[in-house]
């Protein structure tokens, strides 16, 4: 299977990077091909300009590659911190530029965009790993967990992906090394559950 893994965190020593490394290692050990992008280290440009808005536009090479990979992906894994109930700006820009009409979704002929979209992504499963410093109870009672709605409803279901799982590791700022190692072991288990070893048949 082709699995697209997108990481958005600026600190190479972060738990997010450790989660991404564990994810990629587990996928490769299971025989999957991985499209891996560390958006910060690649200096991904998140700015969507007006010239890119038309569906049939000639895209910059870097964006074209991302679009091709997301189209070929059988699974998608996103890794990022919860910043103000949102993804980091660089990842929001990736969504704006890559999860685009004609690539990830379209509307039926004659539909001017106010109808129900048709998802184009062929990936069957999407996983999101988040880190947070807000306790779960406060997140739900005060903020309502906006990232769950964003990824599940506004992006993946919108684009045709029905199997979705999200895991939030918290509270990172007070976590111990032991706790973080347990989280990484859990990450490996989750990846192995949703993207098990390829059959050799």
Image: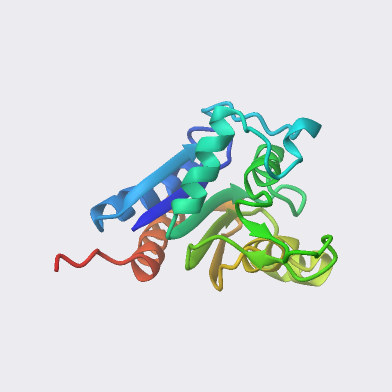
Residue 53 rendering spot, x and y as whole percentages: 76, 40
On the image, the x and y values in percent for residue 10 come to: 58, 33
Can I make out residue 67 in this image?
A: yes
**Vertical comparison of 192 with 5: above or below:** below
Instruction: Please name the residue shown 56% across and 68% down the image.
Output: 161
* Numbered-mark total: 0
Q: Which residue ends up furthest to the left in the rendered image?
A: 201
Percent across and percent down for residue 135 are 68, 63
Left or right of 134? Residue 181 is left
Relative to 97, does residue 123 appear above or below in the rendering?
Answer: below
Residue 170's image quarter? bottom right
The coloring applied to the image is rainbow
- The residue that appears at 66% across and 47% down in the rendered structure is 95
| Residue 15 shows in the view | no
| Quarter the N terminus occupies | bottom left
The one nearer the camera, 87 or 11, is 87
Residue 143: percent from left, percent from top: 81, 64
Q: In percent of the image, x 36 and y 60: which residue is there?
A: 188
């Amino acid at each position: 299977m082709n699995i697209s893994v997108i990481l958005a965190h600026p600190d190479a020593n972060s738990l997010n990077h450790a989660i991404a490394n564990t994810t990629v290692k587990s996928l490769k050990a299971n025989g999957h091909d991985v499209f891996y992008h560390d958006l910060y280290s690649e200096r991904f440009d998140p700015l969507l300009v007006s010239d890119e808005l038309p569906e049939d536009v000639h895209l910059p090479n870097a964006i074209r590659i991302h679009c091709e990979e997301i189209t070929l992906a059988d699974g998608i894994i996103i890794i990022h911190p919860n910043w103000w109930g949102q993804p980091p700006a660089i990842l929001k820009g990736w969504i704006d530029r890559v999860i685009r009409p004609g690539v990830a979704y379209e509307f039926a002929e004659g539909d001017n965009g106010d109808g129900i979209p048709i998802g184009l992504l062929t990936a069957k499963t999407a996983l999101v790993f988040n880190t947070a410093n807000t306790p779960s109870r406060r997140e739900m009672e005060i903020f309502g967990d906006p990232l769950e709605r964003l990824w599940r409803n506004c992006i993946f279901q919108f684009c045709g992906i029905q199997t979705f799982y999200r895991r939030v590791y918290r509270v990172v700022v007070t976590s111990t090394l032991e706790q973080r190692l347990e989280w990484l072991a859990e990450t490996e288990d989750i990846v192995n559950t949703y993207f098990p070893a390829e059959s050799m048949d």
